[in-house]
Amino acid sequence: MNRRALLSVSDKTGLVEFATGLVDAGWQVLASGGTAAALATVGLEVADLADHTGSPAMLGHRVVTLHPKIHGGILADRSDPAHRADMDRYGIEPIDLVVVNLYPFETRPGVETIDIGGPALIRAAAKNHRHVGVVCDPSDYPAVLDEIRSGGWLSGATRRTLARKAFARTAAYDGAIVSWLDERDGEALLPPSLHLSLERAGALRYGENPDQPAASYRRIGTPGGPDDAEDWWNAVVQHGGVSLSYLNLLDAGAAWALVHDLGDQPAAAIIKHAGPCGAAIGEHPVRAYRSALACDERAAFGGVVALNRPVDIDTAGAMAGAPQADVIIAPGYGGGVVERLRAKRAGTRILEAPTPRRPTRTVRRIEGVWLVQGVPPELWDRSGWRVVSRRDPGHLVEDAAFAWRVAAHVASNAAVLARSGTAWGIGGGQQDRVGAVEIAVGKASGRAAGGVCASDGFFPFPDGIEAAAAGGVELIIQPGGSVNDRAVVEAADRLGLSMIFTGQRRFRH
């Protein structure tokens, strides 16, 4: 039986090789105007769709494939006598394979790049996958062609797999169009409807615990709209170490976000269980790394180390002599660095990543409800800061800015003690603020004396100020906004501390 394929593609990648393979396998190939023309330029003669239907493209090519001879040939149930009778009556020939990819709306949004005929063809073929194969991704051409060459046709399992992919593609395409319309109407941040079309990127070693299966997912097609920032992870390259787990990804993402919030200087951050246990800036990456490690070297074992500069041989040497990290993530690695790290830390995942892009919103799920929120202003924006104490902060302002950035990445309630560009004590995840301060003071063990304390939320009572003063700090930076602000500021003045109100809360849950 001679089989028939319909080709109508916007992306011509691999088209000639695929169409040639079909023709060589004895298939009849129908092609829409642009696709037929592309094949004709290499001498491959195929049947033009307009000749097959007897209807030319019209309305500026808005109507090309929307024809009963096309959709009837795709949708017909070949086992149904009534369908076969209709095909005979109206001169409809069966179409066995539909190869379509869509106008590139995601990269060139606009009314004229909203594909109508393409999704209709894809959905028709996917619906009738019992009889018809559908290919919407050029990367599938080689496998499809190999199966056709070896067996003459596609197995039922292959057709089902292709149909699932096709429906996912059209769903993502429609979602991109809706998101574009929302953006044009000024509702991109919190739109009337939210569309997340994801494909499995790969299996993970396990979830939060070894008995939980897990996988990572990414957007189908080219990301667009306000969530572009999530795309950076797709460009991450792993140079060594065992496969990544669920927690590795969570912690690597947290570490990468923190280290890029620490400013333009060389910086290092260490994350354990999604929370910072070290952060520092310095004149050189190795200095920043050693300072970050000094914050809590015991907690750093098995954590994620992030640097905002390429790892050089000196920094690699420091890492090789330190407690083993599960993951190292950096923008690059100098000559011989990866090899040295592999030799000393064979199990450590070595990741090279691009600079993360700042999202405009975050999305989380609880049972039955999705929570969407805009992200807060940049952490280095000091326009709303004001000194509320009698003592002027002086040179401590820079340490205050550093500690404030770190505190924003710690689970609430959070407190960070810092001095000279290094976080020396980090307390987080506490239900009472004074408890977070006490933990940070204990972790610092006097190393933050003469430095600062940052709190992600206001101090409701003077006891938190007294606890910070016991750690030897000389400045406290906090949002302010408590009904007890006056008493809190009076406590700072009584203890000889400087105090800054940022006017911004930085809870993290």
Image: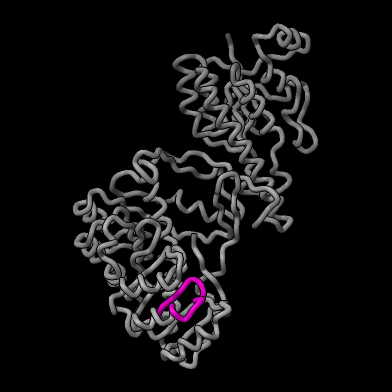
**Part of the protein shown in magenta:** 452-464
Residue 365: x and y in percent read: 55, 48
Q: Quadrant of residue 215?
A: top left
Q: From the viewer's perspective, is 232 left or right of 450? A: right
Q: Position of residue 369 (x, y in %)?
A: 60, 47
> Could you tell me residue 398's position as x and y percent?
43, 81
- The reply to whether residue 380 is visible in this rendering is yes
Q: Determine if the magenta segment contains residue 459.
A: yes
Residue 287 in which image quadrant: bottom left
Q: Considering only vertical position in the picture, is 387 above or below 161? A: below
Q: Is residue 134 left or right of residue 208?
A: right
Residue 154 appears in the picture as rendered? no
Q: Which one is nearer the viewer's eye here, 9 or 89?
A: 89
Picture mark count:
0
Rendered view: 234 above or below 426:
above
Q: Residue at left 53%, top 87%?
A: 388
Closest to the observer: 302 or 315? 302
Query: Which image quadrant is residue 168 in?
Result: top right
Residue 160 among magenta residues: no
**Measuring 50% from the left and 44% from the top, which residue is drawn there?**
218
Q: Could you tell me which residue is drawn at 68 percent across and 50 percent down?
A: 180
Taking the view exactly as shown, the residue that stands out farthest to the bottom is 390
Q: Is residue 23 above or below residue 213?
A: above
Percent x, y of residue 416: 40, 73
Q: Which quadrant holds the N terminus?
A: top right
Query: In the image, is 87 to the left or to the right of 134?
Result: right
Residue drawn at point x = 47 percent, y = 59 percent: 356
Looking at the image, residue 481 lies above or below residue 357:
below
Between residues 67 and 494, which one lies in front from this camera angle? Answer: 494
